[in-house]
Amino acid sequence: MERAFPRKLESLEEIFSFIRVFGLEHKLKDGPLFFMDFTVEEIFTNMVKYNSKSRAEVTISLEHRPGELVLTLVDTDADPFDITRTPDVDVSRGLEERKVGGLGIHLVRQLADSLDYTYVNRQNKIIIKKKIEDADANG
Amino acid sequence: MEILEQSQATYTILTVQGDFLCEDEKPTIRDTILRDISAGKKFIVIDLRNVHHMNSCGLGSLVSCMTTLRKCGGDLVLLAPTDNVKFLLSVTKLNSIFKVYATKEEAIANFH
C-alpha cells in the first residue's frame, strides 16, 4: 500500500488514517499499529521540518511480509540526511542535563529491528523493518 | 489535543485528550503550566489516560514542563499513562524522572 502526502504537518491526520486502513486490512493489533504511527510520524515530521524548501510530496509505503512490517519513506528533492548516522541521545542523564531534541530518531532506532538508508538523485529513502509475531496480526 | 484543567487548593489536574504530539499545536501543555505557575499553582498532575499517541515532541514538552516547575519549587506527576506511553517513557528512561501513578488519589497524595 503506497501513497504520497503533501509536505506539511497537517498531513499527519491523513497519514494516521492511511495506517489505520492498512492495519484493518492486515488485521494488525495495537502494538504494530503504535509502532507504525510513531515511526512514520517521527520521520515524516523530520522530513517536513528539515527539508522545507522542497515542494515534492513524501511517499509512504507500508508492507506486511511474513513475520515483518516494512515501512518505506521517500523524500524527494532533498539534501542527504542519514538517520542511521545521527548521534545517540544519552537517555541516562538526569532531568537538568536532558536535551529535548533528538529523542525521536533515538526512539525510532530503539523500536525498529532494522533501518536502511539510501541517497540517490537527491532522494532520501528510509526503509524500516519490524519483526512481528503471528499474534500481532490476524487479531 | 484538548486540555481540561481542574484546580484545587494545593494541586492542579490537567487532563489531556487526544494525540499528544507537538508544541506547534495550540493550546500547549507548556502554555497552560506557565499560566498556572503565574497564578501560584506549582503542583501539577497530568492525566494521560486518554492519550493513545505521543511523539518525541510531546515527551520533550513534558521534560521542559518538569524542568520549569522544579526550578520554581513545584513538581509534576503523571497519571494513568496508556501502555504505549508507558513504553515510550521506559525506552527513553524518563520513567526514572517522572513519578507515574495509577490513580488520582495516589497522584495527589504525592503533593501532601
Image (tube, coloured by chain):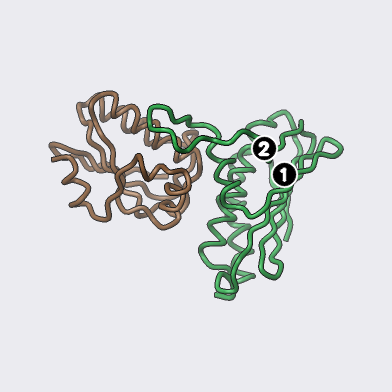
Chain colours: A green, B brown
Q: Is residue A109 above or below residue A131?
A: above
| Mark 1 surroundings: few (<14), some (14-19) or many (≥20) residues within 10 A | some
Separation of disc 1 and disc 2 at Cα? 8 Å
Mark 1 / mark 2, whichever is N-terminal = 2
Question: Dot 2: what SS?
Answer: helix
Q: Which residue is mark 1?
A: A58
Direction from residue A4 to residue A93 in the image, left or right: left
Screen quadrant of the C terminus of chain B: top left
Percent of width and height locating residue B5: 27, 41
Q: Residue at x 74, y 42 (%)?
A: A57
- Splitting the image into 4 quarters, where does residue B2 fall? top left
Q: Chain of mark 1?
A: A
Percent of width and height locating residue B4: 30, 44
Q: Residue at x 26, y 30 (%)?
A: B36
Question: Viewer-nearest of labels 1 and 2?
Answer: 2
Q: Is residue B71 above or below residue A60?
A: above
Percent of width and height locating residue A110: 57, 48
Percent of width and height locating residue A64: 69, 65
Screen quadrant of the N terminus of chain B: top left
Q: Which residue is mark 2?
A: A47
